[in-house]
Amino acid sequence: MLKWIFAILGFTYYRFFGGIIGFIIGMIIENYFLKSQKTQGGIFGDVFSGNTQSSAKVTPQDFELNLLTLCSVIIKADGSINQRELDYVRAYFVQAYGKERANATFRTFNDVIKKREIDSARICAYMRMRTSYEVRLQILHFLFGITQADGSLSSAEEQELNKIARHLHISQRDYISIKAMFAKTNDTGNAYKILEIERNATDAEVKKAFRTMAKKYHPDKLQGMDEVYKKGAQEKFLKVQEAYEQIQKERGF
């Protein structure tokens, strides 16, 4: 398309030879942009983009590897590798992608990624460009789940989670909301955090917050994704419902 636009412009101003030169310049620019699009992206090539899929063949060396690499950042955050956290991740990947594909992803990770220095900012930038906000919320929810596999969230793990959330451009309110979903206490304060409101919110504001959060975390937002992602969305959706019911009971409305 560009080559013809430049050809027309060249012909308009410099007639026949201008058209030829314009055509050549346009073709060079067009080829440059095509090459840039092919080489842009994350460490492992093209991946899913929310409900869409790239034209390139999706292999275990795309979305799964980037996600697994972020998992390794969280697992190693406190300086030790916990077997329960590793088992949690493996079970998640097997459920999401099947045993064969999950094993292929882990093999590639062991062969390639462990030998590289991990740049979580770059990985998050890559995933941010190719996933919807709802998918990124589910990624953060999954990463929080890893930290709970051994029964506790360390300060080092929380620091990495916060960093990843910022790199994924997840709002601080959503970060606090998801973190509250994993709180061990049944304090009503966590219910307010999940709904992203203050304790002094009016009943009308509580009801509005519930509708907003239920819509945000509804499993339908992840149409086209694997069932395990929808299951994670369902877990968040239920947490929102539980938080609302807890506040309802406390206030008596």
Image: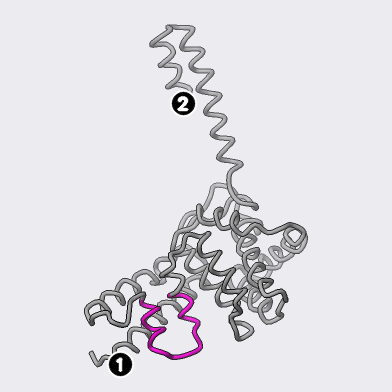
Give the number of the disc on residue 2.
Answer: 2
Report whether 150 appears left or right of 131. right
Q: The magenta stretch spans which residues? A: 177-195
Q: Position of residue 98 (x, y in %)?
A: 63, 70
Q: Position of residue 214 (x, y in %)?
A: 35, 74
Closer to the chain start, of discs 1 and 2, is: 2
Q: Between residues 31 and 155, which one lies in front from this camera angle? A: 155
Q: Position of residue 243 (x, y in %)?
A: 37, 84
Residue at left offset 51%, top offset 73%: 141
Q: Quadrant of the C terminus?
A: bottom left
Q: Position of residue 143 (x, y in %)?
A: 57, 72
* Element type where label 1 sits in the image: helix
Residue at left offset 41%, top offset 16%: 8
Q: Is residue 9 above or below residue 176?
A: above
Q: Between residues 123 and 189, which one lies in front from this camera angle? A: 189
Q: In the figure, residue 134 lies in which quadrant?
A: bottom left
Three-letter code for the amino acid on which mark 2 is drawn: Leu
Residue 188 highlighted magenta (yes or no)? yes
Q: Is residue 88 above or below residue 11?
A: below
Q: Between residues 236 and 76, which one lies in front from this camera angle? A: 76
Residue at left offset 46%, top offset 7%: 16
Q: Residues within 10 Å of mark 1 (few under 14, many from 20)?
A: few
Q: In the figure, residue 215 lies in which quadrant?
A: bottom left
* Element type where label 2 sits in the image: helix
Report whether 205 appears left or right of 62. left
**Count of numbered badges drawn on the protein:** 2
Q: Is residue 249 above or below residue 131?
A: below
- Which residue is labeled 1 in the image? 250
- CA distance for labels 1 and 2: 64 Å
Residue at left offset 66%, top offset 65%: 101
Q: Select label 1 or label 2 by which is in front.
A: 1
